[in-house]
Image (tube, rainbow, N blue to C red):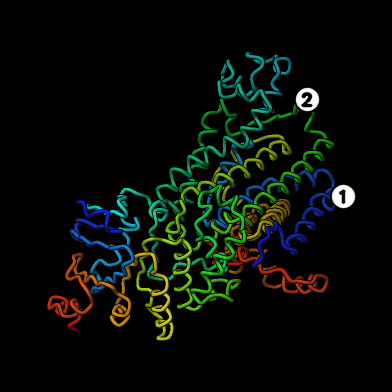
């Protein structure tokens, strides 16, 4: 048994190189800026999928409300950008200049107190992580210490996603309502709508995604990651081995929320607006499907799954828009019935033995099988 | 109660009722340090419930459980484990997706908080201890195998090993030889005799031969109450025990 700690084994290292090559070289050179911006948007969902691999794949905690955290991260970013776009000069035709336009339309005459701190970029960056993590902590504390789990937890997270959507739509004057926060222009004076800015944001987004991937991989490779798998298999055994299972669950749920929120903030920056349609139940379930299709036990699988499903969605919506939802449903059923471990599972079964043989020809010692990534359990 | 501290575990007036049904009824039981106590009794006598109550899985309705003077009924499960009580479940509860090594490593009593688990490093102390335990439970040589591929008997041993690595002062085993072959059963009896040094063990067992083999004292439970207690010879000849349990 080896004592050392390695973040990736050889084949995972290869995956990482391929992924970096794809995101930073192949796609930027192969696609025009419109398509690349779309890929950038898809990749923001991949943050959520990464969080789900930790939370659902490793830890067995299925959350159907990750849109909540994606949305909170995105809204925090949008609030900052909206305030910057709402200078008194730019809004001088309003009855109250200097506040966001939708507030003026809703007869609000003063910036609400919770909008004030979003004048500051450092505060905003902190809030993007802290606000969703705080909500995840409260939900986790309330649910996991009471031993709410499985389907019940999934339903409750859905309810939370629905509640936030209803709140945002209902409080139009404070949140922009169903239209969301639109017409975002600059970040500290830098116009985010230009092609150049879109390129820069795409690369920043890719870099952050790789950073989150490394963080998630680190968690999976340390003892905490093995504990999560253990908890998924035999929760009571972990508890009666002296661990506070609720704390472990709260931690991984918060971490998944924080990673999702980064995706949400990058979404706002790249797409230029944020609306409740990225917060509620439907997008949350779609995000779970991305993760399931890619393989909920594989971080790389989750990213490819996100790209693939979104690519299919775009193609379908352009050609046969009315068929898309059915195709999506069929895809999910197919994943659950036929290949529960998604694309990554198919790869491991059919392609990996061949790749491993190829790698072994070059290297001396074969890598041990990564046990945390294999499990033949059906999706919950 | 001056004598209270002499016992490792003192259960007094313990009662638990599920919707009016008293699964354990006013139970009093004392376990000495270094004692092997076997609890026998017919199905539904409340044997497993007693273990559930001690390890905190079930909350008592009334009564007290004192372990080295600490009241266990007020503590949470993982705190009871930290205090020195280890429990093996009836069906093997191991982590099938992890290797034998990783199963034992997770049970090693270090880095039990979230951040402790992140900072945990597999150093030589851990590796040596895992190897030592693996040898004891006949699983050295299988350390890199996924636990799902172990036989039923090996899984039982692995779970016993996972408890041993915690070095508990009180070890509770729920039917450790159920479903084992004759040779596995013998090996398990040898294993138990080896591991009891320096700790107390409570064993629930149906197999009278096995119970006789290892027990210092035997407690017979019936309908949540102690029917008889003492050494095996006395218990076997107790007419009440013969009537409810051994007679048929």
The residue positioned 71% from the left and 24% from the top of the image is A85
The residue positioned 56% from the left and 39% from the top of the image is A133
Residue B130's spot in the image, x, y percent? Answer: 55, 66
**Badge 1 or badge 2: first in the primary sequence:** 1
Residue B186 shown left or right of residue B229 in the figure: right
Quadrant of the image occupied by residue A124: top right
Instruction: Residue A137: tell me if it is visible.
Output: yes
Q: Residues within 10 Å of mark 2 (few under 14, many from 20)?
A: few
Quadrant of the image occupied by residue B140: bottom right
**Disc 2 marks which residue?**
A189
Q: Quadrant of the N terminus of chain A?
A: bottom right
**Disc 1 marks which residue?**
A29
Instruction: Residue B73: tell me if it is visible.
Output: no
Residue A29's spot in the image, x, y percent? Answer: 87, 49
Question: Foreground residue, A313 or B66?
Answer: B66
Residue A254's spot in the image, x, y percent? Answer: 55, 44
Label 1, label 2: how many angstroms apart (C-alpha)? 28 Å
Residue A24's spot in the image, x, y percent? Answer: 82, 49
Question: Foreground residue, A302 or A121?
Answer: A121
Position of B41 relative to A128 (above/below): below
Q: At numbered mark 1, what does the secondary structure look like: helix, strand or loop?
A: helix
Question: Foreground residue, A74 or B156?
Answer: B156
């Amino acid at each position: 048994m080896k004592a050392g700690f390695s973040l990736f084994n050889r084949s995972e290292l290869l995956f990482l190189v391929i992924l970096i090559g794809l995101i930073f070289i192949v796609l930027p050179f192969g696609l025009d800026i419109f398509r690349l911006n779309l890929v950038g948007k898809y990749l923001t969902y991949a943050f959520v999928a990464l969080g789900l691999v930790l939370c659902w794949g490793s830890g067995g905690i299925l959350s159907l409300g990750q849109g909540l955290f994606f949305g909170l991260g995105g809204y925090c970013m949008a609030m900052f950008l909206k305030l910057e776009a709402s200078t008194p000069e730019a809004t001088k035709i309003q009855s109250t200049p200097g506040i966001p336009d939708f507030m003026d339309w809703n007869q609000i005459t003063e910036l609400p107190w919770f909008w004030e701190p979003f004048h500051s970029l450092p505060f905003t960056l902190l809030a993007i992580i802290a606000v969703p993590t705080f909500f995840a902590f409260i939900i986790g504390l309330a649910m996991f210490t009471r031993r709410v789990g499985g389907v019940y937890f999934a339903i409750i997270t859905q309810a939370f996603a629905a509640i936030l959507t209803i709140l945002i739509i209902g409080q139009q004057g404070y949140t922009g309502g169903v239209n969301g926060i639109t017409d975002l222009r600059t970040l500290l004076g830098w116009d985010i709508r230009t092609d150049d800015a879109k390129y820069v944001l795409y690369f920043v987004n890719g870099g952050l995604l790789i950073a989150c991937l490394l963080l998630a991989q680190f968690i999976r490779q340390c003892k905490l990651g093995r504990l999560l798998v253990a908890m998924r298999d035999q929760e009571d055994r972990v508890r009666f081995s002296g661990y506070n299972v609720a704390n472990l669950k709260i931690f991984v749920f918060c971490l998944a929320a924080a990673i999702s929120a980064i995706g949400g903030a990058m979404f706002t920056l790249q797409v230029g607006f944020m609306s409740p349609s990225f917060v509620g139940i439907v997008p949350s379930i779609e995000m779970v499907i991305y993760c399931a299709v890619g393989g909920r036990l594989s971080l790389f699988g989750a990213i490819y799954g996100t790209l693939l499903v979104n690519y299919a969605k775009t193609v379908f919506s352009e050609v046969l828009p009315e068929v898309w939802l059915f195709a999506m449903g069929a895809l999910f059923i197919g994943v659950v019935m036929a290949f529960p471990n998604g694309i990554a599972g198919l790869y491991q079964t059919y392609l990996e033995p061949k790749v491993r043989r190829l790698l072994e020809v070059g290297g001396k010692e074969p890598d041990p099988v990564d046990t945390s990534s294999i499990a033949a359990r059906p999706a919950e | 109660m001056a004598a209270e501290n002499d016992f490792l575990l003192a259960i007094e007036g313990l009662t638990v009722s599920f919707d009016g049904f008293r699964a354990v009824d006013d139970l009093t039981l004392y376990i000495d340090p270094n004692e092997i106590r076997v609890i026998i009794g017919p199905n539904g006598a409340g044997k497993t419930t007693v273990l559930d109550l001690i390890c905190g899985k079930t909350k008592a309705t009334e009564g007290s459980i004192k372990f080295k003077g600490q009241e266990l009924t007020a503590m949470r499960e993982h705190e009871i484990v930290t205090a020195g009580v280890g429990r093996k479940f009836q069906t093997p509860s191991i982590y099938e997706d992890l290797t034998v090594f990783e199963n034992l490593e997770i049970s090693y009593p270090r880095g039990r908080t979230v951040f402790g688990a992140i900072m945990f490093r597999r150093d030589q102390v851990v590796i040596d201890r895992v190897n030592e335990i693996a040898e004891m439970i006949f699983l050295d040589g299988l350390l890199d195998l996924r636990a799902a591929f172990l036989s039923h008997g090996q899984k039982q041993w692995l779970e016993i090993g996972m408890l041993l690595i915690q070095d508990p002062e009180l070890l509770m085993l729920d039917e450790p030889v159920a479903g084992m072959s004759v040779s596995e059963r013998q090996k398990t009896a040898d294993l138990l005799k080896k591991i009891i040094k320096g700790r107390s063990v409570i064993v629930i067992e149906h197999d009278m031969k096995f119970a006789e083999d290892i027990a210092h004292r035997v407690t017979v439970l019936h309908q949540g109450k102690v029917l008889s207690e003492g050494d095996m010879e006395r218990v076997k000849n107790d007419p009440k025990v013969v009537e409810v349990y051994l007679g048929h």
